[in-house]
Amino acid sequence: MKAFYAEEQKRHDPKAFLSSGAPQPNPEQPERVERLLAGALSAGCTIERPRNHGLGPVAAVHTPEYLDFLEHIYARWQRIEGASAEVIPNIHPIARNGSYPASAVGQAGYHMADTACPISGETWQSALWSAWSAVDAAEAVMSGAPAAYALCRPPGHHAFADVAGGFCFINNSAVAARVLRKQAARVAILDVDLHHGNGTQGIFYARPDVLTVSLHADPVRFYPFFWGHADERGEGLGLGYNFNLPLPRKSADAAFLEVLAVALQRIRAFSPDALVVALGLDAFEGDPFGGLSMTTPGFSRIGEAIAKLDLPTVIVQEGGYLCDELGDNLTAFLTGFGGKMR
Ligand SMILES: [Zn+2]
């Protein structure tokens, strides 16, 4: 299987975030790339550098206002006397009523959901190359590859059309889905990350052409808290095209695979022409987030089950944080997936 990754994706190096109000080292570290690359190579992937696709595929998902913010906010922030080294918001609108501030501080609060996505001078380029990896993986699948893997880092599924959050800036899975839509009438996105894919849900919430399905730790007491509940089913034309499957905390392989079967049945009923897997590996029992209790062989079984859909598939890396088994878990998923591929 082809895998896509560019060195520029490693330059984004966020320093801190607030966890229960306390400053902590940011877990979305460049070192993740080394572990994931090793895991992809072990699974037999060939690594290719993506091409520069410009802003087009990203602007198909995100508002121009937001992209302008992402590109320029770091330089603007540096001109504020006494400001932090990284762009971190400290005020948010409690409702988005259409008013848009001119100030950098106001816009940071408008476009950043939390403190987990600090923006440095390298963030914009890293996020763009991460998205371009997803574009090339989608194009490989459109050119006839049964599947391709995008080593997207920084990740993307918490990014909405105009909001960053949870380590995410550009929604790579959504970008891949929009590229696939050029050929595929219907695309399904299956998100198996520990956390609900709230940005992806938000981007396609009112659309019937992209089915969004997410398995994740129950957000009633877990990030992202305000989204990911079972009663969020879409709106307008998109009503019935969003499907959330929250799992009790510490659910292990058997429970996850049982709920995955329900998700896959819903995807079959949608009869998509192509699939995006938003592949988080942070449901692992040894992941620092500790929300679910999947094992390494469990990821292999997730891969096997998804491969049975027999769809052209773009696998987009989402979460999964530093632990000894991070690379092994990717190898397990890709091997399980590939083992069933025709
Ligand atoms: Zn996650």
Image (cartoon, rainbow, N blue to C red):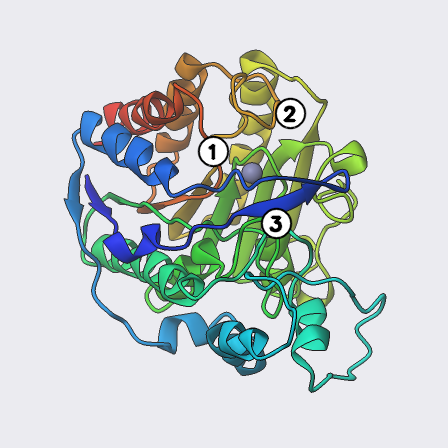
For residue 291, the mark is 2
Dot 3 lies on which element?
loop
> Quick check: is the Cβ at mark 2 less than 8 Å away from ligand 1?
no
* Point 54% across, 14% down: residue: 253
Taking the image as shown, residue 318 lies to the left or right of residue 165, namely left
> Quick check: is the Cβ at mark 1 less than 8 Å away from ligand 1?
yes
Q: CA distance from mark 1 to mark 2?
A: 12 Å
Name the residue tied to disc 3. Answer: 116
Mark 1: amino acid: Gly
The one of 71 and 219 positioned closer to us in this rendering: 71
Residue sticking out furthest to the front: 82
Mark 3: amino acid: Ala
**Quadrant where the image shows the C terminus:** top left
Name the residue tied to disc 1. Answer: 320
The one of 323 and 295 positioned closer to us in this rendering: 323
Q: Nearer the viewer, mark 2 or mark 3?
A: 3
Q: Is residue 305 above or below residue 89?
A: above
